């Protein structure tokens, strides 16, 4: 299980929970969302897009992804951001969440 306060390279089970808001800061209602993702950008290389799940009431706009093997493969500064799209063409991003991944012995 990952430690959210001090994740390590190779951490499995680190939970990333992000909230999507609109331009006014209100939570985006995810009830009819067609795409729910969390994008993880490692310190080097391209961003990786992961399917996220809605947490709690969809009206709260909260998405969650739990890391698996190789999601946190290198030491350094990472960023994560939620992305939500609707069939009508509307989409929203969360604020960026930045965190560091430490090495192992």
Image (cartoon, rainbow, N blue to C red):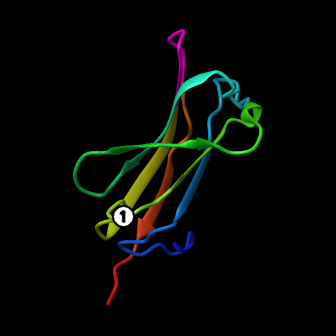
Classify residue 95 by image quadrant.
Answer: top right
Q: Identify the residue at horizontal 58%, vertical 43% (top origin).
A: 53
Q: Identify the residue at horizontal 51%, vertical 72% (top origin).
A: 2
Query: Does residue 86 show up magenta in the picture?
Result: yes
Q: Nearer the viewer, residue 11 or 102?
A: 11
**At which x and y percent is residue 51?**
47, 41
The local secondary structure at tag 1 comes to loop
How packed is label 1: few (under 14 Cα within 10 Å), some, or many (20 or more)? many
Label 1 sits on residue: 72
**At which x and y percent is residue 80?**
46, 49
Position above or below: 59 against 17: above
Position above or below: 30 against 9: above
**At which x and y percent is residue 61?**
68, 35
Magenta-tinted stretch: 84-91
Q: Identify the residue at horizontal 25%, vertical 46% (top origin).
A: 46
Q: Identify the residue at horizontal 54%, vertical 9% (top origin).
A: 88
Query: Does residue 98 show up magenta in the picture?
Result: no
Q: How many marks?
A: 1
Position above or below: 91 against 10: above
**At which x and y percent is residue 1?**
53, 74
Describe residue 16's horizontal placement relative to residue 12 as left or right: right
Going by the picture, which residue comes out furthest to the top? Answer: 88
């Amino acid at each position: 299980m990952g430690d959210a306060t001090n994740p390590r390279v190779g951490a499995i089970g680190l939970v990333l929970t992000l909230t999507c808001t609109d331009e006014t800061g209100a939570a985006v209602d995810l009830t009819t969302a067609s795409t729910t993702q969390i994008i993880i950008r490692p310190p080097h290389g391209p961003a990786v897009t992961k399917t996220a799940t809605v947490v709690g009431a969809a009206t709260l706009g909260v998405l969650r992804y739990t890391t698996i093997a190789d999601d946190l493969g290198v030491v350094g500064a990472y960023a994560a951001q939620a992305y939500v799209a609707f069939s009508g063409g509307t989409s929203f991003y969360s604020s960026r969440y930045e965190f560091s991944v430490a090495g192992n012995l």
